[in-house]
Image (tube, rainbow, N blue to C red):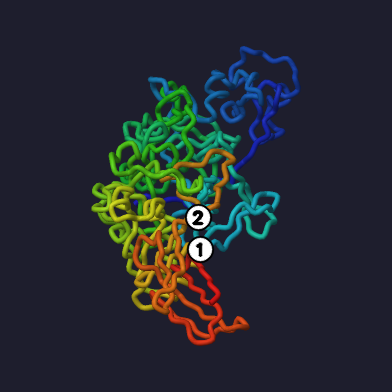
């Protein structure tokens, strides 16, 4: 079986000279025989070959200036080098170049915070020791190994290097030009096109041809996936474990690695120089040509894959998604509640009939969370499943009375207009071996929004950022509005036949729990009770009731 190397690059960052002819000896080495000529501004032979101009650093040292206006003879095609952003143009037909031999093949990918459970106990820092995010320990370990990771809010972090912060290494948030992460020479990583190499064997920026990839259809959807590979890749990255004849293939997501590895089933591949076959600079942009910038991970409503913690909690339970445009009627979502972006409509769905049952967490099956009679297409958020598993770990067995509901099913049972059941992070739970009050405390202590019913607990994670794979990434600079003051719950106090009652509305999953309190003239507690009605004892001055843990009412007698 293919062995994966679970760490990506310690990234090498180069400062590119502006306003000079572009051939630069990689990493600023002072011993390149042509360095003095090209960087001193001395006259050069514009017709010189790459080898004459840059020696053995021809492929690695060639780049454009900051304005993309000047480029040296080492850059045979300005459009490829300046405009291709490391991905290159569409590969030309023709023959590959010289044989380089057999290389070990491994894979790396973007790790997803949403696939990991546990509390957010580890801080990730930038090089200035500013905290970027708090994340679960499992994700902190995974991003350290992979080098690139996506937070639950959609931010992609890239390995920066060892640092003197409370935790090391440090990271930086990639910009829009590097949606899949950043490699050496600030090169944008491109799914199924970028490879990490040992620079002493393969110069950075080289085009390579991998025989075993030619003719194999890549996972995912256009423009970054779903194409038939031509074998062309680009040396865009490196890593501490990449030594000698070893290629680490960027497979976008772990699910894509599993798919490709299953198709190829090899631990070594035959590698040649790109030659005429890969004259566009390594293929680029998912085979669509032209160096098109791929969409940010998970965006666009074009399907893709979604990964859950799975049986072992390692994020390997992955499903293919279908875009919202394919799901048909019954999925008309309401406008976002109070304009809150966590209530935006999904762009991708799970096809329950196509996926079948799946163990999405150590103690939960997909069929416990979503059933096709409530809607063939479902939204289930991995981070909410991880939260649910955390509750299960603490409390023992939990029965899920209700999970995902399609908008049409939710309306058919008179569910709340903006019920979190439609967003895949709300669950009605019934504890098996602990009390309702214990489950309620665990929900709130685990960041959940609690609604208390007489027979069960509703717990949702509406305040956690929704998964961008399912809901699309936010526009740059957008921040979630957390104003949820327009609560769907209401109640009122009424006296009837000597007893107090609290009629309620908006509690669509059952009868809400009512917790009554009677206070004396000095505010002292006289008694507490639960039930639909309440008769206060003699001497009561104030009656209070908490309805469903959501509405608090008080009246003076």
- Residue 511 versus residue 241: which sits nearer the camera? 511
Count the labels in the image: 2
- Residue 368 versus residue 281: which sits nearer the camera? 368
Q: Where is residue 220 in the image (x, y as percent from the top left)?
A: 36, 39
- Tell me: residue 214, above or below residue 398: above
Q: Where is residue 176 in the image (x, y as percent from the top left)?
A: 56, 36
- Residue 504 versus residue 479: which sits nearer the camera? 504
Residue ID at (57%, 42%): 478
Label 1 residue SS: loop
Q: Do the residues labelled 2 and 1 touch (CB within 8 Å)?
A: yes
Q: Which residue in the protein does label 1 denote?
A: 447
Residue ID at (37%, 43%): 348
Most distant residue in the bottom direction: 538
Badge 1 density bin: few <14, some 14–19, many ≥20, Cα 10 Å: some
Q: Where is residue 316 in the image (x, y as percent from the top left)?
A: 38, 54
Image quadrant where residue 133 sits: bottom right
Which mark, by number, is residue 138? none
Q: Which is more N-terminal, label 1 or label 2?
A: 1
- Tell me: residue 449, above or below residue 112: below
Q: Which residue in the protein does label 2 denote?
A: 464
For the residues labelled 2 and 1, the Cα–Cα distance comes to 8 Å
- Residue 549 versus residue 66: which sits nearer the camera? 549
Question: Along the horizontal axis of the image, is 556 left or right of 354?
Answer: right
Label 2 residue SS: loop
Badge 2 density bin: few <14, some 14–19, many ≥20, Cα 10 Å: some
């Amino acid at each position: 079986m293919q062995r994966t190397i679970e760490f990506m690059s310690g990234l090498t960052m180069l400062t590119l000279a502006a306003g000079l002819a572009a051939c630069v000896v990689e990493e600023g080495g002072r011993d390149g025989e042509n360095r003095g000529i090209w960087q001193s501004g001395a006259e050069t032979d514009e017709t010189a070959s790459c080898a004459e101009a840059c020696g053995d650093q021809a492929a690695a040292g060639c780049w454009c200036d900051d304005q993309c206006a000047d480029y040296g003879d080492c850059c045979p095609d300005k459009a490829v080098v300046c405009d291709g952003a490391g991905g290159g143009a569409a590969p030309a037909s023709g023959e590959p170049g010289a044989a380089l031999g057999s290389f070990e093949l491994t894979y790396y990918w973007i790790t997803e915070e949403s696939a990991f459970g546990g509390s957010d106990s580890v801080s990730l820092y930038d090089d200035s020791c500013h905290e970027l995010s708090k994340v679960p320990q499992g994700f902190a370990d995974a991003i350290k190994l992979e080098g690139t990771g996506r937070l639950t809010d959609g931010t992609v972090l890239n390995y920066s290097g060892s640092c003197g912060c409370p935790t090391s290494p440090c990271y930086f948030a990639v910009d829009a030009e590097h949606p899949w992460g950043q490699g050496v020479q600030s090169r944008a990583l491109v799914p199924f096109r970028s490879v990490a190499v040992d620079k002493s064997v393969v110069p950075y920026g080289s085009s390579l041809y991998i025989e075993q990839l030619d003719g194999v259809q890549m996972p995912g959807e256009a423009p970054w996936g779903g194409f038939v590979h031509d074998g062309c890749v680009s040396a865009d990255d490196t890593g501490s474990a990449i030594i000698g004849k070893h290629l680490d293939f960027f497979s976008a997501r772990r699910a894509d690695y599993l798919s490709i590895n299953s198709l190829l089933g090899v631990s070594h591949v035959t590698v040649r120089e790109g030659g005429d076959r890969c004259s566009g600079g390594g293929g680029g942009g998912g085979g669509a040509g032209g160096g098109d910038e791929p969409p940010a991970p998970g965006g666009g409503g074009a399907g893709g894959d979604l990964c859950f913690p799975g049986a072992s909690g390692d994020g390997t339970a992955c499903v293919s998604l279908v875009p919202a445009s394919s799901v048909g009627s019954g999925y008309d979502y309401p406008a976002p509640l109070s304009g809150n972006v966590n209530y935006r409509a999904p762009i991708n769905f799970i096809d329950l009939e196509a996926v079948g049952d799946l163990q999405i967490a150590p103690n939960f099956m997909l069929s416990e969370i979503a059933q096709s009679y409530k809607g063939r297409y479902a939204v289930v958020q991995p981070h909410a499943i991880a939260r649910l598993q955390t509750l299960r770990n603490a409390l023992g067995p939990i029965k899920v009375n209700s999970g995902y509901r399609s908008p049409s099913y939710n309306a058919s049972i008179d569910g709340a207009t903006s019920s979190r059941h439609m967003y895949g992070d709300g669950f009605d739970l019934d504890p098996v071996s602990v009390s309702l009050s214990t489950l309620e405390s665990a929900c709130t202590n685990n960041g959940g929004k609690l609604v208390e019913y007489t027979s069960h607990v509703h717990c949702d994670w509406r305040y956690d950022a929704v998964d961008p794979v399912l809901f699309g990434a936010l526009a740059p600079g957008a921040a979630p509005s957390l104003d949820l003051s327009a609560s769907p719950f209401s109640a009122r106090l009424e006296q009837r036949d000597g007893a107090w009652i609290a009629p309620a509305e908006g509690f669509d999953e059952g009868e809400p729990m009512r917790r009554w309190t009677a206070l004396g003239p000095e505010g002292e507690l006289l008694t507490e009770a639960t039930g639909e009605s309440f008769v206060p004892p003699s001497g009561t001055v104030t009656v209070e009731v908490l309805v469903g843990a959501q509405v608090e009412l008080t009246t003076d007698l």
